[in-house]
Amino acid sequence: MAKGMYFERFDPTKGESLQILDPEGRLNEDLRPDLPGQRILELYERMSVMRLADQTALNLQREGRMGTYAPFYGQEASQASAAFLGPSDWLVPTYRETGALFLRGVPLQSLLRYWMGDERGMRVPEGMRVLPIQIVIGSQTLHAVGLAWAMMLQGEKSAAVAYFGDGASSQGDVHEAMNFAGVLKTPVVFVCQNNQFAISMPRSGQTAAATIAQRASSYGFPGLLIDGNDLLAVAGAMNEALAAARSGGGPRLIEMLTYRIGPHTTSDDPSKYRTAAEVDVQKPFDPLLRLRRYLGAKGLWNDGAEAAILAKARAEISAAVAAAEAMPPAPVSDMFDYTYRVLPPYLERQKSEYASFLKDEASRGGRHGF
Ligand SMILES: Cc1ncc(C[n+]2csc(CCOP(=O)(O)OP(=O)(O)O)c2C)c(N)n1
């Protein structure tokens, strides 16, 4: 496949979309991205760990060992888009991107800790270009455009990647971000994971436009609709969009069409708004299944290899859970220390009152430190 071709060749306004590996695991050689077999294997392994980590997180919540959690089951290939960012690109995530953050290199124990309700879980390793998870729908796209603009002004050849969902695409913030990005030609890649639901609102109720990708044309930059359950389409689209953004080609929008198999979050009951049969229809399109078929046909995969990586994944995840649960609670003083540079007197008073309360509590065997 010649460089720079996916966005030119597949026009979402004509209903065209990119698929490279079909659900049976058959590769379209003409469209094959520059991704060595060994790298595909490696990504398959990381996606398997990611899936197991996601299931573990869900179980931890059900056991009362974690707070609300937003699973990404079914979206592993779209989440793996994070593997194509370079070290100097920024990843700007929402709550859905636990898998993307994991692939970026944020330690799993930190991610679990975050979902256990500890903000310190968002303290990423020094120098890693990752913004904290955004819960406010759509506003992170503005932050990404700001980051991209700053990098552009500083002459850096890096991109910012903003993740958002089909529901977020209806937010004013997302419109403003894309409009601004188009005008200023900021190096930003908008990644819309269209998992076909915004909590209970199906994609059909979200917009009358045939695709979300086609909106890019109205902002003056290219958009591409891809099969978001196809890792190779994700790889091709991401590499092309990132290369364009980093070299002054302006923004790109990629709509990754996927499906949220699980609930919106652990507080949601999807049976209220969709049938089990509807979900079953989506299962054959599983992103891991098609990679397994592809790798199996190439002789790179078999049941033994699958069992071995799952055993490795279980060990990696158990260690992360143990480390997250062993972390002592955040000092209560954190609550006072990170909002004001100089604490207002009334908060200073509360802080010292609370410190003496905790001291008394500690003398009675309480466990919170200050
Ligand atoms: C500004 C704002 N409005 C409403 C909400 C409540 N809310 C949380 S998740 C969600 C749905 C978002 O759906 P989508 O953008 O498709 O992302 P997904 O959850 O499917 O990944 C809504 C409305 C919010 N967090 N922020």
Image: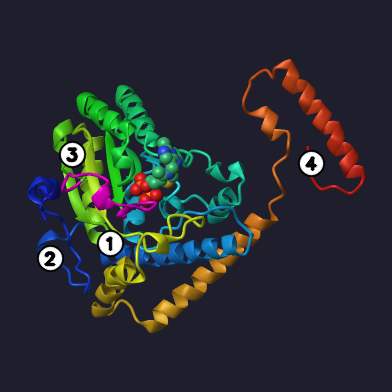
**Residue 90: x, y in percent?**
38, 38
- Measure the alpha-carbon separation of dots 2 and 4: 60 Å
Amino acid found under the numbered disc labelled 1: Asn
The image quadrant that residue 361 belongs to is: top right
SS assignment at label 4: loop
| Structural distance between the alpha carbons of marks 4 and 3 | 52 Å
Vertical relation: 269 (above or below) 300: above
202 or 171: nearer the viewer: 202
**From the viewer's perspective, is the residue at label 4 or at label 3 nearer?**
3
The kind of secondary structure element at disc 3 is helix
Q: Would residue 130 be visible to someone looking at this image?
A: no
Q: Ligand 1 sits in which quadrant?
A: top left
Look at the picture and state if 298 lies above or below 9: below
Q: Is 206 above or below relative to 268?
A: above
Q: Nearer the viewer, mark 2 or mark 4?
A: 4
**Which residue corresponds to the image point at 76% horizontal and 21% vertical from the top-left?**
348
* Residue contact between numbered discs 1 and 2, judged by CB atoms under 8 Å: no
From the viewer's perspective, is the residue at label 2 or at label 3 nearer?
3
Q: Which residue is mark 1?
A: 229
- Judge whether residue 207 is colored magenta: yes
First-in-chain label (4 vs 3): 3
Residue 29's tag is 2
Mark yes or no: residue 210 visible.
yes
Magenta segment range? 195-211
Q: In the rendered view, would you say 21 is above or below 107?
A: below
Q: Is residue 162 on the magenta stretch? A: no
Q: Which residue is mark 3?
A: 215
Q: Nearer the viewer, residue 278 or 1?
A: 278
Residue ID at (13%, 59%) = 31
At x 78%, y 37%, the residue is 370
Sooner in the amino-acid sequence: mark 2 or mark 4: 2
Which of the two discs, 2 and 3, labels the residue nearer the N terminus? 2
